[in-house]
Amino acid sequence: MSSSSNNAASLLAYLNLATTNIYVDWVGTRCDGHPTVATHERMGERLVEELALHLSC
């Protein structure tokens, strides 16, 4: 595969991942309306799942 093909494939994989929905059910909010640490941890777990899927880990 040529370098430009690799670059195009990498860009396409990035764009697919960049638009992936990692929404999770919130585990409450803080008093300022932002997600709790537990919610951020769930989003991180979803992001790891998506990265593994897209990067074939």
Image (cartoon, rainbow, N blue to C red):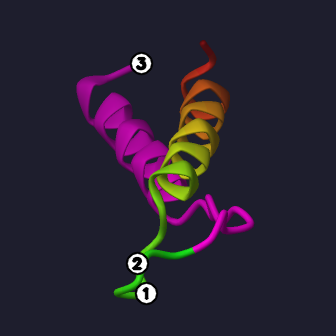
Residue 33 appears left or right of 46: left
| Disc 3 to disc 2: CB gap under 8 Å | no
Foreground residue, 57 or 4? 57
Which numbered dot is residue 1? 3
x then y, percent, for residue 46: 63, 44
| Disc 3 to disc 1: CB gap under 8 Å | no
Q: Distance between the residues labelled 3 and 1?
A: 48 Å
Q: Which of marks 3 and 2 is in front?
A: 2
Magenta residues span 1-28
Residue 34 placement: quadrant: bottom left
| Disc 1 to disc 2: CB gap under 8 Å | yes
* Residue of label 1: 33
Label 3: element kind: loop
Q: Is residue 3 above or below residue 44?
A: above
Task: Give the residue displayed 54% in from the left and 24% down from the top.
Answer: 55
* Residue of label 2: 34
Residue type at the position of mark 3: Met
Residue type at the position of mark 1: Gly
Residue 12 appears left or right of 49: left
Q: Distance between the residues labelled 3 and 2?
A: 45 Å
- 10 Å crowding of disc 3: few (<14), some (14-19), many (20+): few
Q: In this view, does 27 lie above or below 53?
A: below
Task: Give the residue displayed 49% in from the left and 44% down from the top.
Answer: 13
Task: Examine the structure image and report whether residue 7 is included in the region drawn in magenta.
Answer: yes
